[in-house]
Image (tube, grey):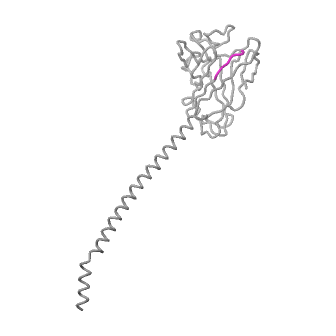
Amino acid sequence: MGKWMKSLKRFARNKKAISGLETAIVLIAFVIVASAFAYAVLNMGFLATQKSQQVVLGGLGAASSALVVDGPVYGYSSAPGTNGTMTSVIFWLKVASGASTVDLNVNKTTIGFQNPRGVWPNIYNGNKLADSSQATGNSLSYTVGGQTYYVAESSGTASATSLVWEVGTGYQLASGQKVRVTLDLTQLQIGSACMAGASPTQTSSYSTSGCSAGVIMKNEEFKIIIKPPIGSVLEIDRVAPAAITTVNDLG
């Protein structure tokens, strides 16, 4: 019995087990802290990667084309001949391959026009013209290089730009849909000749000032600039033929 009691006392005085337990507790604490730190680092890494991906995708979306011309561009003339002019342009738009829906609302998209006589930054007035009490007048005006350019109206419901959905409805152009765009170039004016409310009419001189400034003459180069809310600008550059006919396929 005395021998057993001596062994028990010796075991009670042995601190090795307690020291091992303390070491294990410290080790577990280090593991928990390291795990929490690693989780935070990994989480920040995942967040940074996600943000980088969003930036890259956003940059690609802004740089890539959202709209493309679907088919040829046609120029129409109401008075064809040697000295004839194209008074309207028609073309079709669709969403580019891989692009998302494009909002063609008048408050989101702009359509500009340029010919050798001047530039009209936005001729897309979406049938929202001057005060309804006016029979004729001007609805939009821009001053570029000291010259004033007007997007006029010949009646209370006229519009320089009209959109007709041939496939789809509304102002949201989605994949598989198609919209026909018609530009009435007789609505584009320069200077004060049409400010008194005169209806846009053709003249024989086609001077740099007046109601006829927007029409396209033979061999003239013109440009249509479409700026959607998302995606790069779509520019349509064409040259009028040497002889203006009633219907002109501009390619």
Q: Is residue 83 above or below residue 12?
A: above
User: Which percent across, then down, holds residue 247?
Assistant: 75, 21
Q: Residue at coordinates 66% horizontally, 25% vertically from top-left?
A: 182
The answer to whether residue 219 is magenta is: yes
Q: Residue furthest top?
A: 205
Q: Residue at coordinates 48% horizontally, 44% vertically from top-left?
A: 51
Q: Is residue 76 above or below residue 49?
A: above
User: Which percent across, then down, holds residue 68?
Assistant: 65, 33
Q: Quadrant of residue 186?
A: top right
Q: Is residue 134 above or below residue 5?
A: above
User: Which percent across, then down, holds residue 133?
Assistant: 55, 18
User: Which percent across, then down, holds residue 158?
Assistant: 62, 21
Q: Residue at coordinates 59% horizontally, 11% vertically from top-left?
A: 194
Q: Quadrant of residue 94?
A: top right
Q: Residue furthest bottom?
A: 1
Q: Provide the residue span drawn in magenta.
A: 218-223
Instruction: Work out which quarter of the rendered image holds the C terminus and state it.
Output: top right
Instruction: Work out which quarter of the rendered image holds the N terminus and state it.
Output: bottom left
